Amino acid sequence: MPLKQSLMALAVAGVMALSAPTMVGCVSNTTSNSSTTDRSQLMLVSEQEVMTQSAQAYDEVIAQAKAQGVLNTNKALTARVQKIGDRLIAKAPTFRADCAQWDWEVNVITSQELNAWCMAGGKIAVYTALVEQLNLTDDELATVMGHEIAHALREHVREQMSTQTLKQGALGIASLFGVSNTTLNIANTLAEVGVSLPFSRSHETEADELGLELMYKAGYDPQKGIKIWEKMMAQGSSNSGLAALLSTHPADDERLANLTQLAAELKAGK
């Protein structure tokens, strides 16, 4: 590859990498009550747009689950998940006051997928396999639900959408100056490795930490709760070395060490 082309690709990727942390659309959305609020956030997409899209997507998921007869079919499990959800939701305004006005929902979907999520605006779904196959305790379930709620409190979806908007804008500007498609593809790859993927890993770490604080404030034991990640690792997850670099999640050993330290600090009142 010609040296000039390589340098151009690096320059385009560099502009995108340097622009992301400095072009800030709003300040942190969570309060100083959390240990994860020392990072400003890029917000180029409106909150209303993300809320609207999330509500539409959630309605579609729930409608499909109803049509398939897999929504809240296990009454005991549904009641258990909703009880834990209620306790977490009650404490969520501690970290973000305006979420008290969100139209929260908690539903359980019968599925073999080990999954749970919380969309923007507090739309929560827990899949039965996550609880049943991993035999989750209340502390463990509160940990994973707290993690997903933390993503919504920190508006990570909105932030990711904004980052993609910024990246596409930078590539568009580069193309106007006659940068070739080959160079743009190289720049895009560099941006993914240098900006987008690490950015996603920072989101996962924030959700881990804020979620653990949330479940602790809701009355659950963080030291018992983080066992959920060990159970998830036992399912075959292995993110280390190059795999961790190209993953949107922190390396497993790094994640557990961080959460173990935070759990101990929370219980010690630090």
Image: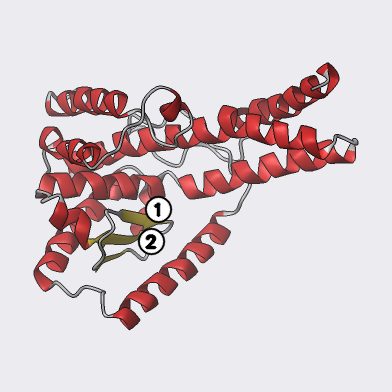
Toward the viewer: 40 or 77? 77
Left or right, 231 with respect to 59, comes to left
Q: Position of residue 38 (x, y in %)?
A: 44, 27
How crowded is the residue under tag 1: few (<14 C-alpha within 10 Å), some, or many (20+)? Answer: few
Residue 36 drawn above or below residue 144 = above
Marks 2,1: beta carbons within 8 A: yes
Q: Residue 98 carries which label?
A: 1
Residue 104 is situated, as x and y percent measured from the top left of the image, at 33, 63
Judge by depth and name the residue closer to the eye, 60 or 5: 5
Location of residue 164 with respect to 15 vertically, above or below? below
Under circle 1, the secondary element is helix
Q: In this view, does 53 lie above or below 210?
A: below
| Residue 174 x, y percent position in the rendering | 82, 36
Q: Identify which residue is drawn at 66% across, 25% down.
A: 18
Q: Which mark is residue 102?
A: 2
Q: Which numbered circle lies on residue 182?
A: none
Query: For residue 164, which quarter of the picture?
Result: top right
Q: Quadrant of residue 203?
A: top left
Looking at the image, is mark 2 or mark 1 nearer the viewer?
Answer: 2
Q: Which amino acid does label 2 sit on?
A: Trp
Q: Residue at x 9, y 68 (%)?
A: 76
- From the top left corner, tell me how far across and down residue 37 is, in percent: 41, 32
Taking the image as drawn, is residue 85 in sight? no
Picture layout, residue 100 above or below residue 43: below
* Residue 174 visible in the current orientation: yes
The kind of secondary structure element at disc 2 is loop
Q: Looking at the figure, which quarter contains the C terminus?
A: top left
Q: Which amino acid does label 1 sit on?
A: Asp
* Colour convention: secondary structure
The quadrant in which the N terminus is found is top right
Inter-mark Cα distance, 2 to 1:
7 Å
